[in-house]
Amino acid sequence: DIVMTQSPLFLPVTPGEAASISCRSSQSLLHSSGYNYLDWYLQKPGQPPQLLIYLGSNRASGVPDRFSGSGSGTDFTLKISRVEADDVGVYYCMQGLQTPPTFGQGTKLES
Amino acid sequence: QVHLVQSGAEVKKPGSSVKVSCKASGGSFSRYTISWVRQARGQGLEWMGRIIAIAGIENYAQKFQGRLTITADRSTGIVYMELSSLTFEDTAMYYCARDVSIPSAPVHHWFDPWGQGTLVTVSS
Protein backbone atom coordinates (compact mmCIF):
# COMPACT_ATOMS: atom_id res chain seq x y z
CA ASP A 1 0.00 0.00 0.00
CA ILE A 2 1.09 3.59 -0.62
CA VAL A 3 2.13 5.28 2.62
CA MET A 4 1.09 8.89 3.16
CA THR A 5 3.05 11.00 5.63
CA GLN A 6 1.85 14.39 6.83
CA SER A 7 3.65 17.12 8.70
CA PRO A 8 3.26 18.71 11.10
CA LEU A 9 0.84 16.58 13.12
CA PHE A 10 -0.22 19.58 15.21
CA LEU A 11 -0.44 23.10 13.88
CA PRO A 12 -1.33 25.92 16.27
CA VAL A 13 -2.40 29.03 14.39
CA THR A 14 -3.74 32.49 15.05
CA PRO A 15 -6.82 33.57 13.09
CA GLY A 16 -5.77 35.74 10.17
CA GLU A 17 -2.42 33.99 9.78
CA ALA A 18 -1.46 31.65 6.98
CA ALA A 19 -1.04 27.91 7.49
CA SER A 20 0.61 25.18 5.48
CA ILE A 21 0.40 21.38 5.71
CA SER A 22 2.75 19.01 3.93
CA CYS A 23 1.90 15.55 2.61
CA ARG A 24 4.38 13.08 1.13
CA SER A 25 3.62 9.80 -0.58
CA SER A 26 5.82 6.71 -0.79
CA GLN A 27 5.25 6.59 -4.56
CA SER A 28 4.59 9.21 -7.19
CA LEU A 29 0.89 10.08 -7.47
CA LEU A 30 1.25 11.57 -10.94
CA HIS A 31 -0.97 9.54 -13.25
CA SER A 32 -0.51 9.26 -17.00
CA SER A 33 -3.65 11.39 -17.31
CA GLY A 34 -1.55 14.33 -16.09
CA TYR A 35 -3.41 14.58 -12.81
CA ASN A 36 -1.97 13.99 -9.39
CA TYR A 37 -4.24 11.57 -7.59
CA LEU A 38 -4.14 13.38 -4.26
CA ASP A 39 -7.05 14.80 -2.30
CA TRP A 40 -7.46 16.78 0.91
CA TYR A 41 -10.19 16.43 3.51
CA LEU A 42 -11.08 18.35 6.64
CA GLN A 43 -12.76 16.68 9.58
CA LYS A 44 -14.24 19.26 11.90
CA PRO A 45 -14.84 18.20 15.52
CA GLY A 46 -17.70 15.73 15.80
CA GLN A 47 -18.34 15.67 12.05
CA PRO A 48 -17.55 13.34 9.15
CA PRO A 49 -14.72 14.35 6.84
CA GLN A 50 -15.52 16.77 4.06
CA LEU A 51 -13.80 17.11 0.72
CA LEU A 52 -11.65 20.22 0.30
CA ILE A 53 -9.37 19.59 -2.68
CA TYR A 54 -9.38 16.86 -5.34
CA LEU A 55 -6.81 15.93 -7.96
CA GLY A 56 -4.14 17.89 -6.18
CA SER A 57 -5.37 21.42 -6.73
CA ASN A 58 -9.10 21.57 -7.50
CA ARG A 59 -11.27 23.09 -4.80
CA ALA A 60 -14.49 21.23 -4.08
CA SER A 61 -17.79 23.02 -4.45
CA GLY A 62 -18.32 25.63 -1.74
CA VAL A 63 -14.71 25.59 -0.50
CA PRO A 64 -13.41 29.13 0.00
CA ASP A 65 -10.53 30.29 -2.18
CA ARG A 66 -8.47 30.72 1.01
CA PHE A 67 -7.71 27.02 0.56
CA SER A 68 -5.30 25.92 -2.13
CA GLY A 69 -3.59 22.66 -3.00
CA SER A 70 -0.31 22.31 -4.84
CA GLY A 71 2.48 19.88 -5.54
CA SER A 72 3.23 16.99 -7.82
CA GLY A 73 4.71 13.53 -7.71
CA THR A 74 5.36 12.73 -4.09
CA ASP A 75 5.25 16.15 -2.39
CA PHE A 76 2.06 18.10 -1.82
CA THR A 77 0.98 21.11 0.20
CA LEU A 78 -2.32 22.44 1.46
CA LYS A 79 -2.25 26.15 2.18
CA ILE A 80 -4.77 28.30 4.02
CA SER A 81 -4.09 31.92 3.23
CA ARG A 82 -5.93 33.41 6.22
CA VAL A 83 -7.06 30.98 8.89
CA GLU A 84 -10.51 31.49 10.33
CA ALA A 85 -11.86 30.06 13.57
CA ASP A 86 -14.12 27.68 11.61
CA ASP A 87 -11.09 26.05 9.97
CA VAL A 88 -10.11 24.10 13.09
CA GLY A 89 -10.13 20.34 12.81
CA VAL A 90 -8.01 17.55 11.40
CA TYR A 91 -6.78 17.73 7.82
CA TYR A 92 -6.09 14.52 5.91
CA CYS A 93 -4.44 13.91 2.57
CA MET A 94 -5.44 10.81 0.62
CA GLN A 95 -3.99 9.05 -2.40
CA GLY A 96 -6.24 7.52 -5.02
CA LEU A 97 -3.67 6.14 -7.43
CA GLN A 98 -3.81 2.60 -6.09
CA THR A 99 -6.42 0.53 -4.33
CA PRO A 100 -6.72 0.69 -1.39
CA PRO A 101 -6.85 4.47 -1.17
CA THR A 102 -4.77 5.47 1.85
CA PHE A 103 -4.80 8.49 4.12
CA GLY A 104 -2.16 10.44 5.96
CA GLN A 105 -2.17 10.42 9.76
CA GLY A 106 -3.89 13.76 9.91
CA THR A 107 -2.81 17.26 10.92
CA LYS A 108 -4.72 18.88 13.76
CA LEU A 109 -5.18 22.61 13.21
CA GLU A 110 -5.78 24.45 16.46
CA SER A 111 -6.40 28.12 17.01
CA GLN B 1 -27.68 17.09 -4.27
CA VAL B 2 -26.71 13.68 -2.94
CA HIS B 3 -27.30 13.04 0.75
CA LEU B 4 -26.24 9.93 2.67
CA VAL B 5 -27.98 8.88 5.88
CA GLN B 6 -26.65 5.98 7.93
CA SER B 7 -28.31 3.71 10.47
CA GLY B 8 -27.89 4.17 14.19
CA ALA B 9 -25.24 3.11 16.67
CA GLU B 10 -24.68 -0.58 17.39
CA VAL B 11 -23.24 -2.53 20.30
CA LYS B 12 -22.05 -6.01 19.45
CA LYS B 13 -20.32 -8.89 21.20
CA PRO B 14 -16.96 -10.27 20.04
CA GLY B 15 -17.39 -12.90 17.35
CA SER B 16 -20.72 -11.54 16.14
CA SER B 17 -21.55 -9.53 13.00
CA VAL B 18 -22.82 -6.02 12.41
CA LYS B 19 -24.76 -4.66 9.45
CA VAL B 20 -24.81 -0.92 8.84
CA SER B 21 -26.97 0.77 6.23
CA CYS B 22 -26.42 3.87 4.14
CA LYS B 23 -29.37 5.39 2.34
CA ALA B 24 -28.70 7.66 -0.60
CA SER B 25 -31.16 10.34 -1.65
CA GLY B 26 -30.95 12.72 -4.57
CA GLY B 27 -29.54 11.79 -7.93
CA SER B 28 -29.62 8.38 -9.58
CA PHE B 29 -28.65 5.71 -7.08
CA SER B 30 -27.90 3.14 -9.74
CA ARG B 31 -25.03 5.32 -10.97
CA TYR B 32 -23.36 5.56 -7.57
CA THR B 33 -20.26 3.95 -6.22
CA ILE B 34 -20.27 3.90 -2.42
CA SER B 35 -17.24 3.34 -0.23
CA TRP B 36 -16.97 2.52 3.45
CA VAL B 37 -14.29 4.14 5.60
CA ARG B 38 -13.79 3.56 9.29
CA GLN B 39 -12.15 5.54 12.06
CA ALA B 40 -11.21 4.17 15.43
CA ARG B 41 -11.55 6.66 18.28
CA GLY B 42 -8.85 9.28 18.04
CA GLN B 43 -7.33 7.56 15.02
CA GLY B 44 -7.08 8.15 11.30
CA LEU B 45 -9.17 7.04 8.35
CA GLU B 46 -9.11 3.52 6.89
CA TRP B 47 -10.77 2.58 3.60
CA MET B 48 -12.55 -0.73 3.79
CA GLY B 49 -14.19 -1.32 0.44
CA ARG B 50 -16.64 -0.09 -2.17
CA ILE B 51 -19.54 -1.20 -4.31
CA ILE B 52 -20.38 -0.08 -7.83
CA ALA B 53 -24.14 -0.08 -7.48
CA ILE B 54 -25.04 -0.28 -11.17
CA ALA B 55 -22.91 -3.37 -11.67
CA GLY B 56 -23.08 -4.88 -8.20
CA ILE B 57 -19.29 -5.13 -8.22
CA GLU B 58 -17.44 -4.92 -4.91
CA ASN B 59 -13.79 -4.17 -4.09
CA TYR B 60 -12.46 -4.90 -0.63
CA ALA B 61 -9.26 -3.93 1.12
CA GLN B 62 -7.17 -7.04 1.62
CA LYS B 63 -7.31 -6.54 5.37
CA PHE B 64 -11.07 -7.16 5.36
CA GLN B 65 -11.27 -9.90 2.73
CA GLY B 66 -13.40 -12.75 3.94
CA ARG B 67 -15.26 -10.90 6.67
CA LEU B 68 -16.58 -7.79 4.91
CA THR B 69 -19.59 -7.80 2.61
CA ILE B 70 -20.98 -4.71 0.89
CA THR B 71 -24.30 -4.97 -0.89
CA ALA B 72 -26.67 -2.57 -2.63
CA ASP B 73 -30.44 -2.66 -2.93
CA ARG B 74 -31.23 -0.63 -6.02
CA SER B 75 -34.97 -0.68 -5.31
CA THR B 76 -34.56 1.16 -2.01
CA GLY B 77 -31.33 3.07 -2.69
CA ILE B 78 -29.69 1.50 0.38
CA VAL B 79 -26.13 0.20 0.62
CA TYR B 80 -25.23 -2.22 3.40
CA MET B 81 -21.89 -2.94 5.04
CA GLU B 82 -21.68 -6.18 7.01
CA LEU B 83 -18.59 -7.01 9.04
CA SER B 84 -18.33 -10.41 10.67
CA SER B 85 -16.13 -12.04 13.32
CA LEU B 86 -15.97 -8.79 15.25
CA THR B 87 -13.14 -8.12 17.70
CA PHE B 88 -12.57 -5.23 20.11
CA GLU B 89 -10.32 -3.67 17.43
CA ASP B 90 -13.39 -3.21 15.21
CA THR B 91 -14.80 -0.61 17.61
CA ALA B 92 -14.92 2.48 15.42
CA MET B 93 -17.03 5.03 13.61
CA TYR B 94 -18.03 3.68 10.22
CA TYR B 95 -18.71 6.10 7.37
CA CYS B 96 -20.19 5.59 3.95
CA ALA B 97 -19.18 8.02 1.23
CA ARG B 98 -19.98 8.47 -2.41
CA ASP B 99 -17.11 7.87 -4.79
CA VAL B 100 -16.70 10.63 -7.35
CA SER B 101 -14.65 10.34 -10.49
CA ILE B 102 -14.25 12.02 -13.86
CA PRO B 103 -13.49 10.35 -17.21
CA SER B 104 -10.31 12.39 -17.73
CA ALA B 105 -8.88 11.05 -14.46
CA PRO B 106 -9.52 7.32 -14.68
CA VAL B 107 -9.20 4.98 -11.72
CA HIS B 108 -9.18 7.71 -9.08
CA HIS B 109 -12.22 8.27 -6.87
CA TRP B 110 -12.57 10.92 -4.22
CA PHE B 111 -15.23 10.89 -1.54
CA ASP B 112 -18.05 13.41 -1.50
CA PRO B 113 -20.36 13.56 0.39
CA TRP B 114 -19.98 11.40 3.49
CA GLY B 115 -22.66 9.95 5.69
CA GLN B 116 -22.93 11.13 9.27
CA GLY B 117 -21.22 8.00 10.60
CA THR B 118 -22.35 4.97 12.61
CA LEU B 119 -20.61 4.10 15.85
CA VAL B 120 -20.03 0.38 16.26
CA THR B 121 -18.90 -0.70 19.71
CA VAL B 122 -17.65 -4.22 20.29
CA SER B 123 -17.98 -5.09 23.95
CA SER B 124 -18.35 -8.22 26.00
Image (spheres, coloured by chain):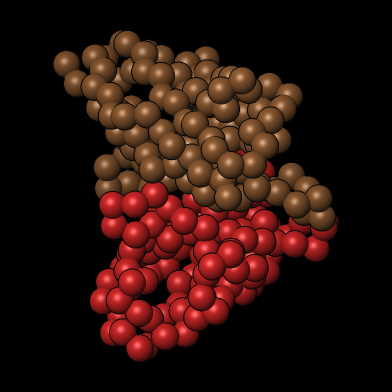
Chain colours: A red, B brown
Along the horizontal axis of the image, is A23 left or right of A95? left
Which residue: 35% across, 88% down?
A: A16
Residue under the point 28% across and 24% down? B10
- Residue B119, image quadrant: top left
Residue B116: x and y in percent read 38, 43
Q: Position of residue A18 (x, y in %)?
A: 41, 85
Identified at 58% across, 59% down, the residue is A39
Seen as rendered, the residue at the extreme bottom is A16
* Visible residue check, residue B38: no
Marks counted in the figure total: 0
Which residue does the image show at 74% across and 44% down from the upper left? B107
* Residue A111 shows up from this direction: yes
Residue B95 is left or right of residue A96, and the answer is left
Image quarter where the C terminus of chain A lies is bottom left
Viewed as shown, does residue B95 lie left or right of A36? left
- Note whether A2 is above or below A71 in the view shown: above
Q: Position of residue A105 (x, y in %)?
A: 41, 54
Task: Looking at the picture, tell me which residue is in the foreground, B58 or B116.
Answer: B116
Q: Which of the image's four quarters has the N terminus of chain A?
A: top right
Seen from the viewer's position, the closer of residues A16 and B45 is A16
Q: Residue B101 at what x, y percent from top left? A: 70, 49
Q: Is A38 placed above or below B9 here?
A: below
